[in-house]
Amino acid sequence: MYTSDLCHFLDGDHPAANGPVQRMGRFLGQCVMAASQRPVQMRSPTVVPCRRRPGHRPCPGPVMVTRRRDGIIEWACGSCLEQGIIHHWENTYWDCRNLQGNEEDTDEILNLRLAGKSYAVLLDARVSLFREDEAFVLRAAARGDEVVLVGSGDEFEELLVTVAGEINHAPNRYWRRKLERIYDEIKAGLTEAGRG
C-alpha cells in the first residue's frame, strides 16, 4: 500500500515536471481530481487508468476512489489490487472541490456515453488539457467498455474547443486521428442531445 503526501509532487504551486516523479504525481493527481468531485464516503469507479503494467501490458482495472470524512483519499485498482492513500491534497492544483457544479447554472445537464478506448486519449500525458477540462474529463465514470460523462452543455462545448486545439497541434497523423475520433464522438452525442 502506498501512502502519499501530494505536496511532494508539486513544484511550487504546479505539478512537478520531471521523470518518475511526474508520472506518479500525474497518477495521484488524477485520483485526487476524480475523488474531490465526488461525494464524501462514496466509493466509485473512475476513468483513471491503473499505472501498473503486469507482464508489460497495461493493467485493465478501473481505479476506484473514495474521499473519506477525515480528508484522506483512498485509491485501489479493481484488477491488480494495488492501492494507496493520499493526504495533504487539499488546496493543491488537483483539488477540484471548487469546480463542482454551480447552483446558479441553468444549463441542461447532459449524459453522454462514449467508447472507453477512444476516450482514453483524453487521459494521455501528451494531451494538454486546461485544468477545468481535465477535471471535467476525470469526473466521468467507467461502465464496462463505455465511459459516462455528465456535465453541462457549456462544459462539453469548452472541452470540444480544447480538443480541436489539440487536433490542430497534433504531432503526427496517428494522434490527429485519435483526437478526431473522440471529438467526433462527443460532437455526435451533443447533436443527438439537441446541442449540436
Image (cartoon, helix red, strand yellow):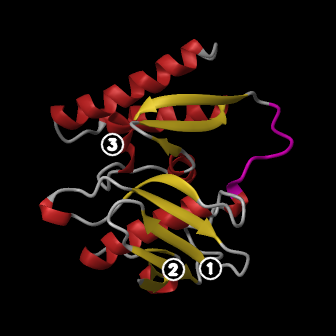
Which residue is tagged 3? 121
**Residue on which disc 1 sits:** 72
The rendered magenta stretch, by its main secondary structure, is classed as: loop
Residue closer to the observer: 143 or 100: 143
At 65% from the left and 57% from the top, the residue drawn is 37
Q: Quadrant of the N terminus?
A: bottom left
Q: Is residue 139 left or right of residue 147?
A: right
Residue 186 spot, x, y in % from top left: 48, 26
* Residue highlighted by disc 2: 85
Which SS class for mark 3? helix
Q: Residues within 10 Å of mark 2 (few under 14, many from 20)?
A: some
Between the C-alphas of marks 1 and 3, the distance is 29 Å
**Crowding at label 1, few (<14), some or many (≥20) Cα neighbours within 10 Å?**
some
Q: Is residue 64 magenta?
A: no
Amino acid identity at mark 2: Ile
Is 192 on the left or on the right of 28, as rendered? right
Distance from the alpha carbon under mark 2 to that under mark 3 = 26 Å
User: In terms of sequence position, does the residue under pointer 2 or pointer 3 come before the other?
Assistant: 2
**For the residue labelled by badge 2, is the local secondary structure a helix, a strand or a loop?**
strand
Q: Is residue 79 above or below residue 162?
A: below
Mark 2 or 3: in front is 2
Of callouts 1 and 3, the N-terminal one:
1
**Is residue 38 depicted above or below 32 in this figure?**
above
Tell me where residue 120 sits by quadrant. Answer: top left
- Asked if marks 2 and 3 touch (Cβ < 8 Å), the reply is no
What residue appears at the point 46 percent right and 86 percent down from the top-left corner? 3
Residue numbers of the magenta segment: 99-106
Do callouts 2 and 1 mark residues in contact (Cβ within 8 Å)? Answer: yes
As shown in the figure, which amino acid type bears the numbered disc 1? Ile
Mark 2 or 1, nearer chain start: 1
The answer to whether residue 22 is left or right of residue 5 is left
- Look at the picture and state if 182 lies above or below 124: above
